Image (cartoon, rainbow, N blue to C red):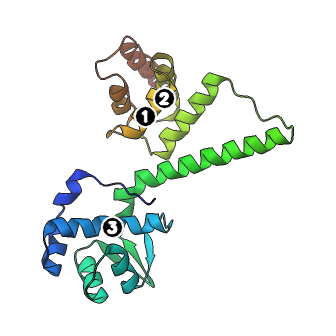
Amino acid sequence: MAHCAVQLKAAEDDKVYCLAKFLKIDPVHAFGYMVRLWIIPWAYQKYDGKLRKSPSFIARECGWSGQPETFISALVDSRLLDEDGDQYTVHDWTEHQGTLVKKLSYDQQRKQEERALAKMALKGEAPKEFGPDEERERRLLQLLDELGCPNDSLTQRKWVQGWLKSAGYAKAEAAIHNSPDKTVVGIHKMIFPNGNGTTKKLFADVKDLKDASK
């Protein structure tokens, strides 16, 4: 089933009101058309937000029953859709869907690794051994990188080790995905909203690492 990322504030975007004005419809309906536009690339696995230049196809997928050219013109004029040579691109695709695309990429890579390990096991081959903590640490660091968490690798590792020790893998992974603040400090606050005994020590350890690397 196709899905997309939608923030509540998107309903108040000026582009929605522009689309409503151009099509002479209620803004609520315009918002629905915008969301259905975002869903099209997901439905057809076009994770770069690009669509074939077919007004009738896009209008049909969005549920528009009027003239396709009128609908496309309104989308372009509202800056919800960009003309890109012989195709269209959903405007600001990376801004709206980039995090979900990165998560999908991470999940696909993880599944590929699991399938590869399963094949190796069937052949009797031994994969590289990771201890439980090392493997979890590696996966969390990879997830931070996939989601574009801004930080240097040295301090990231120290944060991840603290999360694994004090909260566990499942809670740390959920916080990385769900935290609106994609920094290690923001993710840490989601894991420990009321603080915890290791918070001050983590900040101190990270500061020491930064000082030592100067």
Looking at the rendered structure, the secondary structure element under dot 2 is: helix
- Residue 118 appears left or right of 85: right
Residue 114 coordinates in the image, percent (x, y) = 68, 42
Q: What is the number of the mark on residue 36?
A: 3
Residue type of the residue flagged with mark 2: Ala
Q: Residue at point 48% right, 63% down?
A: 47
- Residue 3 appears left or right of 68: right
Q: Residue at point 13% right, 79% down?
A: 24
Q: Is residue 41 visible?
A: yes
Marks 1 and 2 close (CB-CB < 8 Å): yes
Residue at the right extreme of this rendering: 124
Task: List the residue tagged with mark 1.
Answer: 174
* Separation of marks 3 and 1 at Cα, in angstroms: 27 Å
Compare marks 3 and 1 and give the one earlier in the sequence: 3
* Separation of marks 1 and 2 at Cα, in angstroms: 6 Å
Number of on-image labels: 3
Compare marks 2 and 3 and give the one earlier in the sequence: 3
Q: Quadrant of residue 120?
A: top right
Of residues 159 and 97, the one nearer the viewer is: 97
Residue type of the residue flagged with mark 3: Arg
Residue 149 coordinates in the image, percent (x, y) = 43, 41
Looking at the rendered structure, the secondary structure element under dot 3 is: helix
Residue type of the residue flagged with mark 1: Ala
Residue 214 coordinates in the image, percent (x, y) = 47, 27
Task: List the residue tagged with mark 2.
Answer: 170
Of residues 27 and 212, the one nearer the viewer is: 27
Marks 3 and 1 close (CB-CB < 8 Å): no
Q: Residue at point 14% right, 75% down?
A: 25
Residue 124 coordinates in the image, percent (x, y) = 87, 37
Q: Nearer the viewer, mark 3 or mark 1?
A: 3
